[in-house]
Amino acid sequence: MNVLIDSSVLIAVHDSDDIHHDRSVKDLVKVGEQESKMWVTEHVLDEVFTILSKRRKTKQIEHLWSLIESSDIRVYVPQSASQAMQIMRQTYNQLINQKQKRASYTDLHQAVLVKNQYLKDTSILSYDRHLMS
């Protein structure tokens, strides 16, 4: 099983002042106990690194980076440039066609990866209601 981790979870686990901190710690322990592979997208990393940087969480940024370098958290990369374009097109279409949710491009990108099986056998771990699976 694969779990695509949203920025809401990664920010919370790396910021003890975040409202979801305790929940995120428990959720990620559970993912580890299930021996699921944890994944992120570059879009998520952009959000997480930016927010943690603004919150001056340098040690937490370094910790997250060490998890990526050790492959404890894997970064999803499309198989080809044409696949990347296909994913971007599908995400763009979701963005312009959404009616009520007003989800971010990053959130929609993750939903496209899971819904269209670019990352097979995957669920999303998020605290955003429209991404919870």
Image: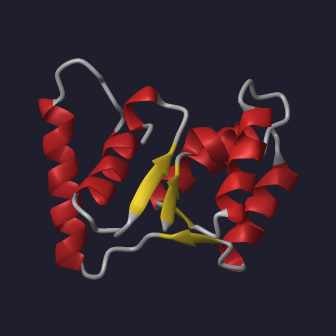
Most distant residue in the front direction: 34
Where residue 83 sits: x, y (%)? 20, 73
Does residue 68 appear to the left or right of 99 in the view shown? right
Where residue 16 sits: x, y (%)? 85, 35
- Above or below residue 65? Residue 59 is above
Q: Quadrant of the C terminus?
A: top left
At a point 23% along the width and 77% down the height, the residue shown is 81
Does residue 73 appear to the left or right of 59 in the view shown? left
At a point 74% along the width and 24% down the height, the residue shown is 19
At a point 81% along the width and 61% down the height, the residue shown is 63
Q: Is residue 52 visible?
A: no
Most distant residue in the top direction: 100
Give the image quarter of residue 103. top left
- For the image, the number of numbered tags is 0
Q: Is residue 120 visible?
A: yes
Q: Nearer the viewer, residue 103 or 118?
A: 118
Give the image quarter of residue 22. top right
Where residue 71 sits: x, y (%)? 65, 78
At a point 22% along the width and 49% down the height, the residue shown is 91
- Above or below residue 1? Residue 18 is above
How has the structure been colored for display? Answer: secondary structure
Give the image quarter of residue 23. top right
Does residue 91 appear to the left or right of 26 in the view shown? left
Where residue 41 sits: x, y (%)? 47, 60
